[in-house]
Amino acid sequence: MRFKLQKGLIFIFLLLTSGISISFPLVDPVNVTGVVIHGLFFLITFVGYFYICRLEIGILTIGWQITVFGFFIHTFDEFFNMTDLLEIILEGVLTAAGLFLVALGIIKAVKKFQEYSNRYLSIFSGEHKMLLIDPATGAIIDANQAALSYYGYTREEFLKKKISQIRISTEEDTTEKMNQARKKEKNIFISRHRLANGEIRDVEVYSGPILIEGKELLYSIVHDITDRIRAQKSLEESERKYRTLFNRANDAIFLLEYTEEKGFGNIMAANKAAYDRLGYKEDELINLSPKKLIAGFEIDSLAQITDRLKEEGKVVFQITQLTKNGREIPAEVNAHLCTIENKPAVLAISRDISERKKNEEKLEYLSFHDELTDLYNRITAGFWKKR
């Protein structure tokens, strides 16, 4: 039984013909050895073809096709109607060319694999602490030397553990974080890990999926941020204490913008005493110009105050402040240049000196009047001074 195929369809139905030729050999005379040899050859061809296509290495695919086509020239010699010499030459050339391309493709594939392996090893053997985790079970598949040294385990001990055994959290939370990393929904996690000696450290973990030998794993790069977390907590505690002192102070405290060109800028922050004294709400006082809080007849004095502040970095001055309802309050202001978030600013502490002003006015009055008679006594004082 022989198949009559058009020459143009041989390339399209190459694999189909290969399978059919195993079941219905076209070689005369038919012998068991030939069928077995053909079957093994095509089996290898199929496996190689699909495996190589899976690797997406085009040169190997072409090599296999040329080799198989060379074999078909030998098998279907009667169909091609070629002389023995032409058949031998063409078969030899195609087979040699195909095998050459196959060999070249294999070399390239091996080289590519070696490059991948070297890159993987160079990354995994670096100074960063790295783990490979099975997202399905949470088992630690591998860890580099930096990770072993950090956690304090031997390789044998560490590879028997699950990530949930070193991560301070619930099993459910750990599974959720692994799923987020596997799906690329999130790749940075702040966590706490327990070392072999029982010490608990704050860590920042960069995690994502990686395919190794056909299996999806999670790679995790671990950075110790314990010192950073402690510094943040210390800063937060300092800010809390500062905020407490800031808001409990009896004096009004203002934080103002400052530039060399314009001097005093708008109010950036103020404490509770400032709001209570001036009668403003927080959203009303923030971003307000300090000129709105000064009696109009004293605004011109701000230029001189600004000049002194530029020269000396600090200045103390008295001014009349205006409340929201227009009431005047005499105040003594102690202003200092400072830096807030790398920007120049002015810290101004304003003290209500209403009582002091009243006492000063009373002393001044008494210095010119008799305390008992309330009569002006400067003439008498001048008389005795002359004598």
Image (cartoon, rainbow, N blue to C red):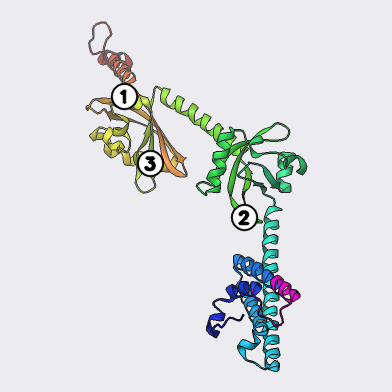
147 vs 265, left or right, is right
* 322 is within the stretch colored magenta: no
Q: Which mark is residue 277?
A: 1
The percent position of residue 245, horizontal first and vertical second, equals: 46, 25
Tag 2–tag 1 contact (CB < 8 Å): no
Quadrant holding the N terminus: bottom right
Which residue was labeled with disc 3?
A: 257
* Residue 196 visible in rendering: yes
**Mark nearer the viewer, 2 or 3:** 2
89 vs 243, left or right, is right
Q: Quadrant of residue 198?
A: top right
Q: Looking at the picture, tell me which residue is in the foreground, 14 or 124.
A: 14
Q: Which mark is residue 170?
A: none
Magenta-tinted stretch: 24-40
Amino acid type of disc 3?
Glu
Amino acid type of disc 2?
Leu
Q: Looking at the picture, tell me which residue is in the foreground, 10 or 218.
A: 10
Amino acid type of disc 1?
Arg
